[in-house]
Amino acid sequence: MAKKELKILLKATKISKSFGNFVANQNIDISVAKGQIHALLGENGAGKSTLVKIFYGVLQPDSGSIEIDNQKVSITSPNVARKNGIGMVFQHFSLFPALTVAENILIALDNKIKFNKVVNEIRKLSKEWELFVDPLKLVSELSVGEKQRVEIIRCLMQNPSLLIMDEPTSVLTPQEIKNLFKILKRLASSGCSILYISHKLEEIIELADEVTILKSGKSIASIDAKKTTTNFLAETMVGKKITELKKTIKSKSKNIAFEVKNLDKLKDHEFGISLTNINLQVNYGEILGVAGIAGNGQVELMEILSGEINCEGNDQILLDKTPIGKTNINERRKLGIETIPEERTFHATVPNLTLSENTFLTYFFKYRNTKSWITNLLNNPQNSLDESKKIVKNNDVRCPETNPIASQLSGGNLQKFILGRSLANNPKVAIFSQPTWGVDIGAATAIRQKLLDLSQSGKAVILISQDLEEIFELSDKICVINEGVLSEIFDVREITATDVGLLMGGKNKKMEPIK
Amino acid sequence: MITFIPRDKVSKNWIIIAPILSIVFTIFFGLLIFAFLGYNPLETLYQIFVSPFSRIDRIGDILVKACPLIIIGTGLMLCFKSNVWNIGAEGQFIMGALLAGFIALSFPNIETKFFLLITILAGFVGGALWAFIPAILKTKLNVNEILVSLMLVYVAMLFIDFIVRGPLRDPMSFGFPLSKPYPEGALINKIPFPGIGFLGQLHFGILFVFLLVPISWIYVNKTLGGFKINVLGSAPLAAKFAGFKQNSITITVLLLSGGLAGVAGVIEVSANIGQLQPEVSFGYGFTAIIVAFLGRLNPVGILFAGIIIATVKLGADNAQMTMGIPKVVTGLFEGILLFFLLTGETLQKYKIKWSEGKK
């Protein structure tokens, strides 16, 4: 969809914004043409979200100017942004679950309209744009995809000339993504510009007309998206060549390492997920990928696999055919089961403690000395100093100083530390949840390589991830978790991404109405 | 609109300069207020800050006043570090004193001072049992410990009132609500200093403080138990990941802090009063909350915070007695001091940014 009349809708010049000493945006220039789909690409922390928040009036720039239709504007609040025709769909939805769709849209409108009129308007828009959603349904009953449609309708009610979308596909199944793209393309051809934020390269090539790449708060390139490749985008975004993963052909063993049998767990709070009849097994030398959209019971599954919560029956979890369902997390660590929860700070580590203290956190039992009660009594983080230094060295964890506190590390380096800490225990079975979530590409590649190496050295690995690419790249076998139910396990060669996508959306259940 | 931005690093110099500046500001505003209210500002300041140090025996009195504050504050530190909000130390103090008093009065003729070990232990048990109620309600039924521990303060106050007016009242007290005097073995003596005699009311109970501060420092910084408390307070999920049992930590810190408050109660009564009466505490359990935070939840800090608060309290008493300044005015001054001390601490960690606009 090439547009010849490139009239500039939004033009931003030399936008800068810093938080304390951290420079989030530095002299960024960007211009979005009318009816253009303009992608904003960059790693986590590159400054994408900051920039669009400035456009939407949530943040104020320190310096720089914004023009809309050649008129200089100062967007002091989201209200002003909407009056200037800018709408935004946030990464995390801002809907009230206890209200209906129409009520949610009504309270967000700047000018007051009658409720019935809103309902009719929603019906009209949803038909016109194929954004099917029932205006009288409660938001809490909607799927993630439907919630996103509500957010889009909410923006469309204001007749926007620019729609900003912040990482809209991270919560969607492949089928839902396809639908979304169709809608966005139609919107663009009707003259509405779209500023689309993502770090997924293939999406950008498929969808965007132009792409601006941010790196460390600076805009480093604006490229015609139709004339580029994913490789080129990736290298520009990261600033270096990306190493390919080394996969060697491995001899598969048939020895079952870790097994879960008929496991049920009722949710322990209102917004939790109940696990129903979970069965899985993983062999030595194998990676089992557990795909699924976040919030479908991964956290609950992880609590039970790690031993933070015990099973009801001891024989619901087996390690080398021995029942261990009632052992706690430290007993499992001693047996050689290492787990990493998806939450890096506050769960896998304590942010205001040093790395040696964070090493002590999971290995304090190693330093127990039964011979001398006084040294045992004084078992403290000092004991893990050497071990933590080793972990830092062996895993290329880049620290600003020796033994820094965990919050001083970047996400990727912290994750390398956490992974290294687990590997230092030389586990037989490794269960990792979202290990590369929010990590820059360089660190993600290193982490993925470590997982491959682990399985190639004969260990059993369970990888819980919402990143489908990662699942397919690493796994030997794949299963899918959806609303607390685990699918059967497939060999990676027997299943396609489309099948997995259907399972992620709950294939056996009623599909969302696509009329 | 004011926003607080965390500083990258807390400057070493400011750790010393900030408290000094806080006191300078306090003095400045104190002078203004006293002058405005028609009191001689310099003399008031002298009474509050200098008179407690003016005689050597008064220094002894500062330590006596600081003693229960430091003991209770140390126990509360363990709770607050692990995000358990025990604000009922006043009640635990009373129940510790009461149980120890009951034991002491049961042996009216005992003389050996080794008996003190038993009464102090009884004080610990009494305070710990009182704190066990919020502990068990929190861990078993998820009841908020702030409400339970606070309400139990009033129960304890009325209970000791009932006991000294009823079962334990001394028949010889002419109708006053007082118990019999403690036996010799249950009394804590004043410390005799050769050549000086006594330093005010300074008693042997202060030795417990000098034992408690290093032991609690080692416990917090050099043992697994202290590490668990720290992790639970900073990141409960990480404590779970480490396999620490949240409930048993919660119960432990509540028992320890209740027990220490109880010990403070025993020492206070055995050293300064010598018998049970309706009022055995003078808000020590509440003031100790301020001491714990002013001491930055650090045993050494709490030692100094206890002494500072005790000094100002004594100075305020002096000002009331010698100059007739009402309690509300000296209370106001204490408030100003706390305000500036806490402001100084906050500004060490954060810088203030004034920004325009609504949001």
Image (cartoon, grey):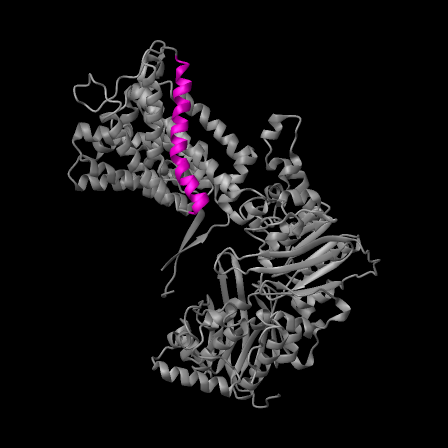
Residue B340: percent from left, percent from top? 33, 43
Residue B263, compared with residue B297, is above or below; it is above
Which quadrant, please, contains the C terminus of chain B? bottom left
In the picture, measured across the screen, residue B91 lies left or right of residue B83, that is left
Is residue B133 inside the magenta stretch? yes
- Span of residues in magenta: B113-142
Determine if residue B19 is in view. Answer: yes
Is residue A297 inside the magenta stretch? no
Farthest-out residue, top: B195
Give residue A490's quadrant in the image.
bottom right
Give residue A102's quadrant in the image.
bottom left
In the picture, measured across the screen, residue B218 lies left or right of residue B109, that is right
Residue B295, compared with residue A149, is above or below; it is above
Give the dominant element type of the magenta stretch: helix, strand or loop.
Answer: helix
Q: Which residue is drawn at the image coordinates 45% and 85% (left, top)?
A: A123
Residue A247: percent from left, percent from top? 80, 61
Q: Which residue is drawn at the image coordinates 46% and 23% (left, top)?
A: B211
Taking depth in this image into account, of A390 and B44 the one nearest to the observer is A390
Q: Which residue is drawn at the image coordinates 41% and 30% (left, top)?
A: B259
Residue B36: percent from left, percent from top? 17, 42
